[in-house]
Amino acid sequence: MTSGEFENRNAARWAEYERLVDAMERGQEIGGVERLPQRFRELCLDHSLVQARMYGIRLGERLNALVIRGYKLIYRSRRHGWESVVRMAAVTFPATVRKEWRLFWLCSAVFWIPFLLLVWVAKHDLTWIQSILGSQGMAQMEEMYGGDSPLAKGRPGMGSDFMMFCFYIQHNIGIDFSIFAGGILAGLGTLFYLFFNGLHIGAAAGYCNAVCNPQAFWSFVAGHSSFELTGMVISGMAGMRMGLAILWPGRLPRVRALVEATKKAMPLIYGAAVMTACAAVLEGFWSAQPLTWLPGSAYAWKYSVGAVLWLLHIVYFLFAGRRAGDAA
């Protein structure tokens, strides 16, 4: 096939592609724009054939210019960072959590069942609590939430609010990363860390509820618990996605299956990281404050804010991004 024959055969397709690109560059609404990605891939193939068959500089430069224009349009979202961030938060993250609903309930069960069990056990027998927290852990709980301690004593000797924010960022991200990275052990590490944190946090909550000042404890954790605990569960979902790829790679080699699973888990990791950061902000600058500048009881404010945040989380993960997903 000569250069002229090749050009005549594909002229109509190239003209359609150029028409779509011109309209999009001018911001005009035009029918058939959904065909642009397909035409772009076909044009890339044509361009490579022109180069391989040495059909001439003129045709090569023409197709190269069209490829560049199409690339800028199709991949322009990568240049608009804020647009990508908003879409990730409003659509991709909640949609991915809903898509992985089986992993969500699995990880929730692994964490919440031991948590609730230890809170219940603490009312009847402290033996399990003592074995999990140890004498030092119980003494720390009593120092933080014992007696009639005001909320500001929820972290004695820990420094300024900003220092506490930094501490919580380091501590919470370390927990979430351990849960996620445990997925590399065929998911067993993820399940272990979720179960262990459920036991430990449940033991601390149960001990404070039974021995210390329950109001001081529950009002302290109410504000940030929705972000912190849900982020922990979602980190577990990402870890289990990796673990399942190792256990059941399908027709792909295990390394390739692991890479693909990690890509699918990235929205979960990004979302969990943001939730952990939000938890640290609340824990550092809100949870331990006495709120003397607000009318009424500080405990009531803490509980109200915590209840509203839990409700917003439920609504967000149930409904956010549904219309955008249906349109896509």
Image: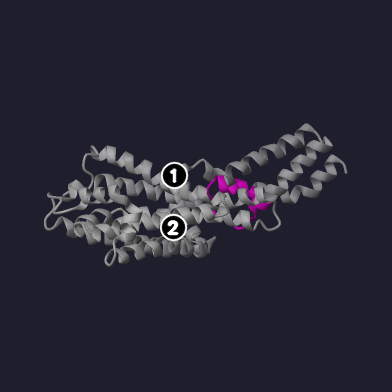
Furthest-top residue in this view: 57
Q: Quadrant of the C terminus?
A: bottom right
Locate residue 132 relative to residue 152 in the image: left or right.
right
The residue positioned 71% from the left and 43% from the top of the image is 44
Question: What amino acid type should be assigned to the residue bearing mark 2?
Answer: Phe
Residue 81 falls inside the magenta stretch: no
Left/right of residue 111 with respect to residue 147 in the rendered view: right
Residue 270: mark: none
Mark 1 or mark 2: which is in front? Answer: 2
Label 1 and label 2: CA atoms lie apart by: 36 Å
- Which x, y percent locates residue 97? 48, 59
User: Which residue is pictured at 13% across the width and 58% down the height?
Assistant: 297
Is 41 displayed left or right of 300 in the figure? right
| Residue 25, horizontal then vertical, whole percent | 56, 44
Q: Quadrant of the N terminus?
A: top right
What segment is highlighted magenta in the picture?
19-38
The residue wearing badge 2 is: 195
Rendering coords of residue 299 (x, y %): 18, 57
Res 161 → quadrant: top left
Check the image and report above or below for 116 versus 256. below
**Which residue position is annotated with label 1?**
82
Q: Amino acid at mark 1?
A: Trp
| Magenta-drawn stretch, dominant element (helix, strand or loop) | helix
